[in-house]
Amino acid sequence: MSSMRILIIEDDTEAANYLAKALREAGHLADHAADGLEGYDKARDGGYDVLVVDRMLPKLDGLSLIGGLRAQKLETPVLILSALGQVDDRVKGLRAGGDDYLTKPYAFSELLARIEVLARRKSSGAGEETVYRVGALELDRLSHKLTRNGKEIILQPREFRLLEYLMKHAGQVVTRTMLLENVWDYHFDPQTNVIDVHISRLRAKIDKGFEPQLLQTIRGAGYMIRDANH
Amino acid sequence: MTPIIKLLRSTAFKISLIYLLVTAVGTGLVLGRVGWNVTHLIDAQIRQTVDTDITGLSEQYSEGGIAQLVAAIERRSRQPGAGLYLVTTRAGEPIVGNVSSLPEGVLSQPGLVITDYLRAGETTGSHRAIARIFQLPGGFRLLVGHDIEEGMRLRRIFVGALITSLIWLVIIGTIGGLWIARRVLHRVDTINDKARAIVGGDLSARLPSAGTGDELDRLVDNLNSMLDRISLLAVGLREVSDNIAHDLKTPLTRLRSRAEQALQFSKSPEDYRVALEKVIEESDSLIRIFNALLMIARAEAGAGPDNLVDFDAADVARDVGELYEPAAEDRGLGLDVEAAPGLMLHGSRELIGQAVANLVDNALKYGVPPKGAEARVSIAAKRLGPMIEISVGDHGPGIAPADRERVQERFVRLENSRSRPGSGLGLSLAAAVARLHRGTLRFEDNAPGLRAVLSLPAAASLPPKLAPPAPRGEAA
């Protein structure tokens, strides 16, 4: 993943510094704005790839800030951070123009995975092709056909959607919650390892008996599909 | 505030005063009207008598002139209860009549007059009369009149009666008002005293009722049932906060001691890494407990989600079933879903989905049957009258009937589940979601095993609510 310019708009300086440091560690450029107005100005002029916006900010609250940017036709992807985790708050955040929503406290790996997915969607318009390819694995979104080395693999409808989402974001880490949200459309935290079991079933179908192994587990973060030979 | 001011300011007294004023005005109007009517009638009669006299006398005069008139008057004035008559010369010398004294100048104005007079033979005690005065040819003057002292007295009696009755009315009314106000105030004061004691912390006290079944008693009864409800909630709250303190402090203590141990005993970076990972794990489980508690609290406060939609319970049952099917298989359990489409619910798909997921989660954790029994978890959705029931059944050890209510409470974990992971909040959350949608969560015997039933009102039987537009699609 190439380096991104990220603006963190967050009034808790310690949290923001930690986040900026971790993002730089991950190879990105991170700036910080401590209140809504400063954040608005920087976001408008700075040419950032992704904005990370806290919902509750001094001077200008997060949702108004996003609304203002969108009214100015600034389409930089926005990840909303909020201590409010209820379903309504998420819906309100997304309706105000946010692209993704993450509840505090969060795992950094979760935040990083979501930022990278957001940034790539903007930069390449990725995911609009009709056929996804990872190595010799080919997924045809129109005919719902999946082949590896030309050999057809039969998937259940949900397994197909799971793989489709993974391949759309090939080369990027996808977390368990992202999968639950985007494949099942639920935002709660299943206490059982339901997603892991789905992944291992999928893996048995697409990777078993093939080399290299495409569907990888990223420890402490989630999953990624990619062709290691590329 | 002194007792008397308190009494005067009481609503009961103010109402009495208003009532008193209305009664006084009414009494005044009635008595006044009757008095006016009676005196008016008497006046009219007197005038008529005078007029009849005049008609008779004028006949005498036209027949025989002044001489016959004088004779007639002489005759009439001697009759008992006679009217008043007087004939004078031009100079004012009386010729005939029964009036001995008149005020100066009365006779010089012809027409109707009201005047004081003295009757012939009397020297003191002037009376009042109504009289008509005529100027006759030859300078003679004639007065024909009638005493009106009777009518005057009657009017005075009426006015006197009016004033006395009003005075008594005000006195009795004020005393009565004060008495009623004191009575009501006394009851309200006892209620207030008790209420202050309750506010002061004695939640077991109840407001006194007089046992008469009047409106104050009914108010007191209702307030008392409200107090019952409040003290029930207070007891519940105390239990909950005790539980929260216990169940949050346990993982917090673990978290703290792990960090402490890491500082004390870690030798290598690898040791630190492992210790920190454990710390993160502990804090994640704390966050989970916290989120669940918040969601339950919100559901119980009745502040429901505002993104309510119509959705098919069968879809939720199938989605959740499909989500958990591989995990169930991992544990050696079969999972089937039985749900015919068209079971429309109105509410939060997300919350109901989570409630069903919690029930399935529970079934996977605790519904593993003894060896040889059928290892199967069944999710079913069906319509039952106005309700839609989503049930999750297993063939595990089940829950004893005595515990079935208790497991819905926060943090309650039955003895045989304490050793396994879990927060004890899953069922509380499911129950809270059910209540939020005006439904219930109940447990039945699945013979053998447990069946948890989420019973929710079908979409048509709920009042329609404004459903906001669908949220933006894919979030990533």
Image (tube, helix red, strand yellow):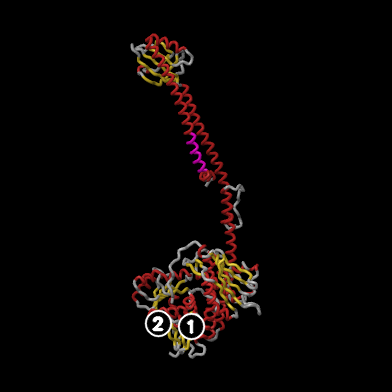
Q: Is residue A39 magenta?
A: no
Marks 2 and 1: in contact by CB < 8 Å?
Answer: no
Q: Residue A168: percent from the left, percent from the top?
A: 43, 81
Along the line of sight, the residue nearer the viewer: A206 or B180:
A206
Q: What is the secondary structure assignment of the residue under circle 2?
A: loop
Residue shown at 58%/72% (left/top)?
B392
Along the line of sight, the residue nearer the viewer: A101 or B378:
B378
Please, what is the dominant secondary structure of the magenta stretch? Answer: helix
Q: Which residues are magenta?
A: B13-27
Q: Residue B456: percent from the left, percent from the top?
A: 54, 66
Q: Which residue is mark 1?
A: A223
| Amino acid type shown at disc 1 | Tyr
Name the N-terminal-most of marks 1 and 2: 2
Q: What is the secondary structure assignment of the residue under circle 1?
A: strand
Residue B240, by quadrant, is: bottom right
Q: Is residue A27 left or right of residue B275?
A: left
Q: Residue B437: percent from the left, percent from the top?
A: 53, 65
Q: 10 Å neighbourhood of mark 2: few (<14), some, or many (≥20)? A: few
**Residue B331 in view of the camera:** yes
Q: Which residue is mark 2?
A: A129
- Residue B398: mark in rendering: none
Spatial distance from mark 1 to mark 2, Cα to Cα? 22 Å
| Amino acid type shown at disc 2 | Glu
**Residue B290 in view of the camera:** no
Residue B225, by quadrant, is: bottom right
